[in-house]
Amino acid sequence: MLPKQRQILRLLLSIAFIISINVQGFSQEQYTISGYVKDASNGETLIGATVLIKELGTGNITNLYGFYSITLPAGDYTVNYSYIGYETVERAISLTSSIRSDLEMKDNSTQLESVVVSAKAENANVSDIEMSTNEMDMKTIEKIPAFLGEVDVIKSLQLLPGVTTVGEGASGFNVRGGGVGQNLVLLDEAPVYNSSHMFGFFSVFNPDAVKDVKLYKGGIPAEYGGRISSILDVRMKEGNIKKYEVNGGIGTIFSRLAVEGPIVKEKASFIVAARRSYIDILARPFLNNNGLEDVGLYFYDVTAKANYYINEKNRVYLSGYFGRDVFAFDERQGFGWGNSTGTLRWNHLFSDRIFSNTSFIASNYDYGFQFGENDDDEFIWESDIYTYNLKQQFTWFANTNNEVSFGGEAIFYRFLPAEVEGSSAGDRIDLSLDDRKGLETALYVGNKHQVTNQLTLQYGLRFSNFQYLGDGTVYTFNDTIPGARREVTQETESDKFESIKTYSNIEPRFSLNYVFNPATSVKGSYQRMTQYIHLTSNTAASLPTDVWVPSTNNIRPVKGHQVALGIFRNFKNNKYEASVEGYYKFNHDEVDYVDGADLLINPFLEGDLINGVGRAYGLEFMLKKPSGRINGWISYTLSRTELKMDGVNQGNWYPTRFDQTHNLKVTASYDLNSRWSFSGNFTYISGTPTTLATQKFNWQDIPIALVEERNNSRIPDYHRMDISATLQAGDTKRNGSPRFFGLMKDSYWVFTIYNLYGRENPFAIYFSPEDIRVTEGVFAGTSARQVSILGSWVPAVSYNFKF
Amino acid sequence: MTMKALNFISLTVLAATLFFSCDKEISLDLADSDPFVSIDAWIDNRMEPQEIAVTLTRPYLNNEGIPTITNASVFLYNETKSTSMEFAYSSETGKYIWDPNVIGDSIGSVGDQFRLEVITDGLTYESSTVLYPVPTIDSITFEFYEEDLFVDQDYYWGDFWARDLAGPGDTYWIKSWKNGVHLNKPAELNFAYDAAFSEGSEFDSAFFIQPIRNLMNPFEEEETDTYTLDIAYDVGDTAYVEIHSISNDAWFFISRVADETNVDGGFGALFATPLANVPTNFTTSEGDVPVAGFFNLAAVSSRQQIVNEESIRDNRPQ
């Protein structure tokens, strides 16, 4: 261990010590009430349910595994369990020894009023320490009109303040001005490197298997790290532990089927959910008649999870995801990508106050393409990133005022940028690039500290370290002209697992919440995040072929600071929730590209990347009506995001591709009666930056554009409206006889129109010469053109069932 | 790996994803800026008149004639052989011309170092390069294909067979003609780094890979967003292919030109890289005065072939 690291470890330990002194200041006899809170209908644990000790006005919120623990002096108490959409339960307890109190809560969703937008205590948005976070449950997501009627987690997130995209068809999402690759997307803790199917039209999360979606845009707790912009934590359902259940749907693009049920009743359960698109199946007769029987165009994914309650103290989970997109032009030529992840988890209670989670996670993302007509002439390229992650997390429910979390993780990365085999007229050549390895480790400690009934603090420290490991060729580049491609000056060979370059960072995290009254609070936060792996992309939209690269001796990790301040206020007895948040971010060592950077199969890729600084700031407004027959929200973001790089725009600040000054979203749904409900949403976004040509010159009769500055102009504004109607099919026909033998009592139809008024929203402006062959004396003209990815309205219908 | 390969994929993906995209011409007010000198100096050492164009840049959406500079002084120096050649303005072609037949000797030979000097309006524009070697073209063959969804009649698909020179780092520009028509659309730009697409690929000494050796076939992209191949070749057609040796910098210049001019609209816009300037290898005597254009001096090999019984054969060199 280096002296610096030893110092940091000492620092972490002393913080842990300070916390432990702080939480041990009680002399009275203390007992603990703890347990799991679950849904009575299917045994799914409830994340974020409130457990309140009425007499003290304090309590706890169930963690990501549905566990809570409250330590109190001996006495008689009333424990109030609440969760929106469920019937509140009160239990009287006499605390003379520690009590295990598991609870199953009943869904009260038969009442119309209970339609939920947020699944927490009614004023949780005010009282929780969390700021800059958004939680969405599937019931809300399912209501939002979706492209081609396919319920989509990521598209729904884009209706929230601070979350944007550069347009239809672009993979991923941008958070508070950050790049797509600056979001850590976790599916049951496993990193998902590309969250999109079919470029960016659909996301990889199967709504039938998702339980909870939480996006951290700021105030990120110390247990998370590795990306500078956001953490998207998607948790999968555990599967009905009481009875078998089948959910599914037949849509315009996908069909879905999910089966869940007990393996051993009340002990173990599973869920398997699968989706597949079927354009290719529908097009089959057409393709076969045209000699194109080998054309394949489809995507699919399978999400599966099983869990087992070994006993009161131990529970294990195994979950996995496997998805793939395939564009095959014929038997030998095509293009595809996919993620696969696996997570093995063990929840263990060391005591009723110490909750432990141990996870082992493996994740892979790959893409590849292949062309060529036969073995003698072909080109096969595959790129992979493998991740193995071992994670240990502890939560110590010290007392009602302190919840201490600590732990660590180690992530081993293996990047295979290009495994390429080529042959030309029978000459076989291996074009593969060296693989790259990295080890990211982190230790963290944090405390959620309720100082008074009004003031809550959450503070923590994360110490992260990254080692760029051999083997492979290590390049040293010269520094010539700023903003131009750098040339290799030295090549050295490294040994296997040799540490070529090490980076260490201390990442303090701090949040505070001051509650003026149950309806009003002020929250503030500061965070420092470090990102050691980078998604390189210089195309208009983020693409599946974007390359992940580690920090190396030439690429430094990106370090980001963020401060945020917000006011949260609820009106009319929590009927309306309002918030305003402001943020300012400053990032060091952001990555951008030289003009004409070659990011694919380029051994000297590092020479095409440039480092600079970035900043982003904005104001986010949110007004939400979480329940009632009419519910929904309005979100508005005013923001700016800029980069400053040597050699680009004379070293001045310039806006990034995804800078959006105004971003307004309105979403609402209306329940007409027990059968019909309607939803709509409207989006308005300022035009994103683009680079416009000024002049041109000719080379060999081809006119070529000249530009003065990068991102010197903007494309026209974007706006769109979508609507949908949901019809509950009901379990009886008009004459009263059961439909489908009464099996499909929860089936419903969804009718959607995306881009209702058919606006041709601009995606990009480009400049191109006339597509003609020039001869002596004939010149190709030039023009400016605008592309819209969607040029019309898109209707869709889907049928969803459950039995 | 260049954008060219990615374009190839994107076009094919495009064919498979008949999406809803739309693409239209728009009018824009582009920022005004002052014109500056641009020099197009791509010459070779064949015994043919060599031409250099010296013009001014013009507003991007101005589709009128090109403003030519008629009074520049254009000198080429073969620094290895210590000779100099003056290119004289010809009002007939609007270019500066030097004819080797007048002195009966070529510009120079492989390995020679050259410097080009253009003086106009009191400023000197300079660039240097080396004359690199070029491989010969062994043969041109044609393979028979039946009509399919993309091409509505039977056709012959041509390959030119040439091997990249031994040793990494050779770069080429390949020009093709069908029945005397130069295939010079931006999408038909054909260039190679060794036998393949990019630096460091180690695709050395091999036959030029596909699709490089097939880009001699004309192909069209129609307005409908469907990817359609023109009838490549028919029996009796003539194919003519030239390989020009170019510097690595000139290769990068052409690959950048292809990026900037061969832009896919519609769904292909997702794959587009942001608009940026292509490089130049000219320097100006006053550093902050901009200049555009590129200088390259090539050695050239060529081959002509008629589509006939002899040249129609399976997709393999003999």
Image (cartoon, coloured by chain):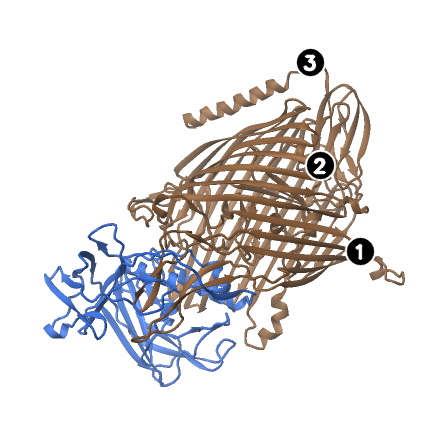
Q: Chain of mark 1?
A: A
Q: Height in image: B126 above or below A579?
A: below
Front one among B287 and B220:
B287
> Residue A9's x, y, as percent?
49, 25
Q: Quadrant of the N terminus of chain A?
A: top left
Which SS class for mark 2? strand
Q: In the rendered structure, which amino acid carries the disc numbered 1?
A: Arg
Please state which of residues B63 and A549 is positioned toward the viewer in this rendering: B63
Instruction: Give the colour of chain A.
Output: brown
The residue to which callout 3 is attached is A27
Which residue is drawn at the image coordinates 62% and 55% (left, top)?
A301
Check whether the beta carbons of the residues at disc 2 and disc 1 lie within 8 A of each other: no
Which numbered disc, 1 or 3, marks the residue that appears first in the sequence? 3
Tag 2: residue type?
Answer: Phe
Q: Which chain is blue?
A: B
The residue lying toward the viewer, choosing from A249 and B115, is B115
Q: Kindly identify which residue carries mark 2.
A: A571
| Number of the label disc, if any, that sits on residue A675 | 1
Say which element carries label 3: loop
Gap in angstroms between the C-alphas marked 1 and 3: 58 Å
Would you call the spot at circle 3 few (<14 residues within 10 Å), some (14-19), or many (20 or more)?
Answer: few
Tell me: residue A788, above or below residue A583: below
Q: Is residue B267 left or right of residue B168?
A: right
Cα–Cα gap, marks 3 and 2: 41 Å
Q: Is residue B108 visible?
A: yes
